[in-house]
Image: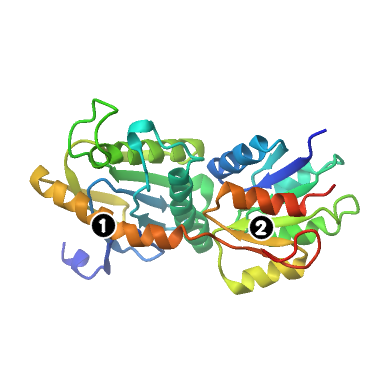
Amino acid sequence: MEGLRRVRKRFLRPGEHCVTREPMMLSTLLGSCVAVCLFDPVAHVSGMNHFLLPVRNPAAGPATLDSNAGRYGLWAMEILIDNKALKLGARRERLRAKAFGGANVLQVSSGALPERYSIGTANVQFVRRFLEQDGIPLVAQDLGGLNGRQIYFYGGDYSVYLRRVPRSSTVAIIDEERGYLRHAIAAKQRKPQVDFFEDGPGSKA
Amino acid sequence: MAKTIMVIDDSASLRSVVGIALKGAGYDVLEASDGRDALNKLTGQKVHLIVSDVNMPNMDGITFVKEVKKLSSYKFTPIMMLTTESQPEKKAAAREAGAKAWLVKPFQPPMLLDAVSKLVLP
């Protein structure tokens, strides 16, 4: 326990991520958002993201990977995996994941619930589908449900300490994280530019 | 006859999503999981465009572009990089290697398809 006090710590806000070869303590607070803790135990690379799919209408059904929301989720996972973990020496086939979050304010039993009540479910479905399709084993999870979560991911042994947040506080967390993300998502979803490298059939866009 | 586009990405999810967009526009799609896998699959059939990720295991996207340019059958096949990478040095290296375009994820299908239509071989 004394040793843990000297471990570098970082708290992740919605839309943030951190990948490191140093055994850090990464923590975050989750309402509807999901956090994926990723690690390669051979390369000693570990990291975590914290994201929320920009689901416009969760009542319409699960966010498919090729929806706008799904593409945003793909981007969040690719930043964690391709741009960070693999660059630090992780190998895709050795990656393992632990996933947390995706709370709903109310039990989801009807497709007609307002967005804030079922967006957590959409996030959970996305994370499970992405990890399965990309062949990354989900070795631990605590997803969905009615409570928010505070999690601590230790890169020294890849363990996660989880504390459930009372439902009364979960509603506030969900409202706060969605407000927080509005700016981040808007920034990331600004129309990207195609750079054509020379004139020809596709002159500058 | 439908034109063929090769999609190279180490994420099966990403290949799937790009494939859905391209197939929906009437293209045939050939998938590869990294540069080396792609080279192994370029075995003589006509490929009208290659869409490649940059950061991949075994062979990264920029090395792949350099290798393709050495192949007489494919050296004129246009290559578009589709990546989360935004480092100017990487973009410059892709251009130097012979890539034709650079699109940063997350992509919107209309933009992807517009770029594809401008680059795809007749």
Is label 2 in a helix, a strand or a loop?
strand
Q: Estimate the x, y position of residue A170 in percent, counting from the top left.
A: 15, 47
Chain of the residue under the numbered disc 1 shown in the image: A
Q: Which residue is mark 2?
A: B81
Task: Mark 2 vs mark 1: give the one in front.
Answer: 1
Q: Nearer the viewer, residue A65 or A185?
A: A185
The N terminus of chain B: image quadrant: top right
**Distance from Cα at disc 2 to Cα at disc 1:** 33 Å
Q: Say which amino acid is labelled 1.
A: Gly
- Left or right: residue B100 compared with residue A13: right
Whether pointer 2 and pointer 1 mark residues with C-beta atoms closer than 8 Å, the reply is no
Q: Say which amino acid is labelled 2.
A: Met
Q: Estimate the x, y position of residue A60 in percent, counting from the top left.
A: 37, 32
- Left or right: residue B87 compared with residue B26: left
- Left or right: residue B18 compared with residue A158: right
Q: Nearer the viewer, residue B72 or A203?
A: A203
Chain of the residue under the numbered disc 2 shown in the image: B
Q: Quadrant of residue B95?
A: bottom right
- Tag count: 2
Q: Estimate the x, y position of residue A55 in percent, counting from the top left.
A: 37, 43
Q: Is residue A64 above or below residue B86?
A: above
Q: Which residue is mark 1?
A: A179
Residue at image position (48%, 54%) is A81
Mark 2 closeness class: few <14, some 14–19, many ≥20 residues within 10 Å = many
Q: Quadrant of residue B63?
A: bottom right
